[in-house]
Image (cartoon, rainbow, N blue to C red):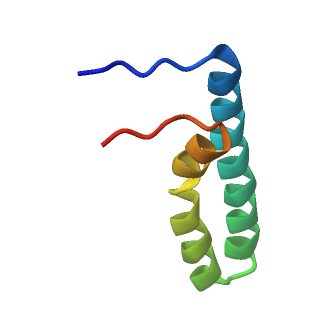
Amino acid sequence: MEKTTISRKQFTTYMIAAFGLAWILEIIAVIFSNNGNQMVFSIVMVITMFMPFMATLIARIPLRC
């Protein structure tokens, strides 16, 4: 099995993107939840679960099957 190496820049970009985007979306979800809009809250939380994948694409980390 081949090892995939990533640079420090890719790792930093991944961490900032994954946590930054997730936290921003979670803050938006909480705002909707506090306003009583549970449907939008649920949808935004589902979208939040895909932020690590989006961060992988943003950092250009190669995907392996």
- In the picture as drawn, the residue positioned furthest to the left comes out as 1
Q: Eyeballing the image, is 49 above or below 12?
A: below
Horizontal side of residue 22 vs 61, given as left or right: right
Report the residue at 44% width, 40% height from top: 63
Q: Closest to the observer: 7 or 48?
A: 7
Quarter of the view holding residue 39: bottom right
**Residue 53: x, y in percent?**
52, 49
Q: Eyeballing the image, is 53 above or below 46?
A: above
Q: Closest to the observer: 51 or 23?
A: 51
**Residue 46: x, y in percent?**
51, 67
Q: Eyeballing the image, is 4 above or below 64?
A: above
Report the residue at 30% width, 43% height from top: 65
Quarter holding the N terminus? top left
- In the picture as drawn, the residue positioned furthest to the front comes out as 2
Report the residue at 73% width, 43% height from top: 20
Quarter of the view holding residue 18: top right
